[in-house]
Amino acid sequence: MTCPLCMTDGGQLVWRGTQLRVIRADEPGFPAFYRVVWNAHVAEFSDLTQAERRHCMDAVTVVEQVLREHLAPTKVNLAALGNMVPHLHWHVIARFGWDSHFPAPVWASAQRERDSAQEAVLRERLPALDAALHELLERSLPSVG
């Protein structure tokens, strides 16, 4: 089986380190949907060493903090499923009371129609968010050996 996260970045690359990368996913209706993807092909979080697990969660935390600072979402969802793609990655998703699925998970049925105007306003803010995220990850995530 070929792994899409081994073959491609998995979305718009925001930052790449030695051990992991951060991408912005192209998920319709959820413009601020990010993933922290472990670069090596491992299926489970427990496959990592303690230092690697800390490094990974530090990256997840940085993404969450930047989303909160730049977008002030109603909530940030974190998930590591891997059922469809068994390659370790964390979903970090800014959620808003106006989004089509809120308060349900993004994978549930929609609760209302999408608000394309709100999505467009949010999308306009993403380049600055991505730049801030890149800069903070570059400064705060040294490589783990």
Image (tube, rainbow, N blue to C red):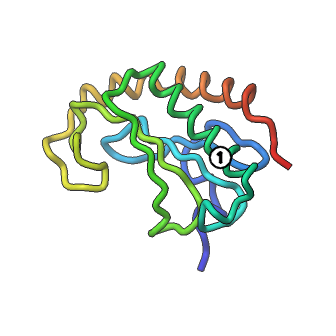
Reply above or below: 143 against 80: above
Give the residue at mark 1: 56
Count every numbered label the image shows and give the total.
1
Viewed as shown, does residue 12 lie left or right of 6? Answer: left
Q: Residue furthest right?
A: 145
- The residue under the point 70% across, 55% down is 39
Image-based side of 67 in relation to 57, left or right: left
Residue pictured at 61% horizontal, 43% vertical: 57
Where residue 46 appears, as percent x and y from the top left, is: 63, 63
- For the residue pair 91 and 52, the one nearer the viewer reads as 52
In this rendering, would 94 be left or right of 2? left
| Residue 131 on image: x %, y % | 61, 24
Quarter placement of the N terminus? bottom right
**Residue 143's spot in the image, x, y percent?**
81, 42
Quadrant of residue 107 within the rendered picture: bottom left
What residue appears at the point 35 percent right and 40 percent down from the top-left corner?
30
Residue 134, quarter of the rendered image? top right
Looking at the rendered structure, the secondary structure element under dot 1 is: helix
Judge whether 47 appears above or below 94 on screen.
Answer: below
Q: Mark 1 is on which residue type?
A: Cys
Task: Report the residue that reaches farthest toward the front.
Answer: 50
Residue 31 in the image: state x and y as whole percent: 39, 37
Q: Is residue 103 left or right of residue 141?
A: left
The single residue placed furthest to the bottom in the displayed view is 1
Q: Give above or below for 80 relative to 13.
A: below
Q: Residue at x 35, y 27 (%)?
A: 73
Observer-nearest residue: 67 or 100?
67
User: In this view of the protein, which residue sits in the foreground, 120 or 134?
Assistant: 134
